[in-house]
Image (tube, rainbow, N blue to C red):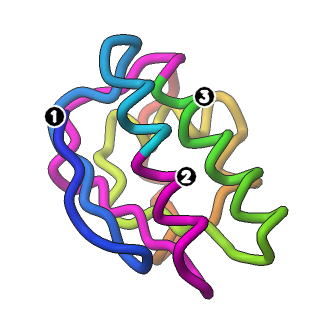
Amino acid sequence: MHIRGDHAELVVGGRLDVRSAADARTALHTALESGGGDLVLDLTELDSWDATGLGVIMGAHRKAGRAGRRLVLRGVPPQMQRLLVATRLHRILAIEGGLEVESLPRV
């Protein structure tokens, strides 16, 4: 996994899973603590995530809310969109441009 960016936008690539969760959590929390306004999380380079990775995203979402900020997901890959819909997290998370929910196959 790799994360690059600043307090306004982070690009996440590779795998966001149990092995990379601690590093990802640290990077997200640092970005949230050092800026203001929306924090955009660009996922276009993300290959996969597991339940732990999704938990990191949800933890950052909660932390952003407590800080008066908003975590916004950008470029969510289709297989991850399906997971967000299946777990109904697409209703909670801010997703730039929304999801093409109607065109996603059922899980």
Amino acid type of the residue that numbered disc 2 sits on in the rendered structure = His
**Secondary element at tag 3:** helix
Q: Which residue position holds label 2?
A: 29
**Secondary element at tag 2:** helix
Measure the alpha-carbon separation of dots 2 and 1.
19 Å
Q: Nearer the viewer, mark 3 or mark 2?
A: 2
Q: Earlier in the sequence, mark 2 or mark 1?
A: 1
| Residue 39 appears left or right of 49 | right
| Residue 15 appears left or right of 88 | left
* Quarter location, residue 38: bottom right
> Along the line of sight, which residue is nearer the eye, 106 or 35?
35
Crowdedness near tag 3: few (<14), some (14–19) or many (≥20) residues, C-alpha within 10 Å: some
Q: What's the mark number on residue 55?
A: 3
Q: Which residue position holds label 1?
A: 14
The residue at 67%/53% (across/down) is: 61
Measure the alpha-carbon separation of dots 3 and 2.
13 Å
The residue at 47%/35% (across/down) is: 82
Place of residue 76 in the rendered image (x, y in percent of width and height, measured from the top left) = 36, 53
Tag 3 and tag 1, C-beta contact below 8 Å: no
**Secondary element at tag 1:** strand
Q: Earlier in the sequence, mark 3 or mark 2?
A: 2
Q: Is residue 79 above or below residue 2?
A: above
Which stretch appears magenta? 27-52
Amino acid type of the residue that numbered disc 1 sits on in the rendered structure = Gly
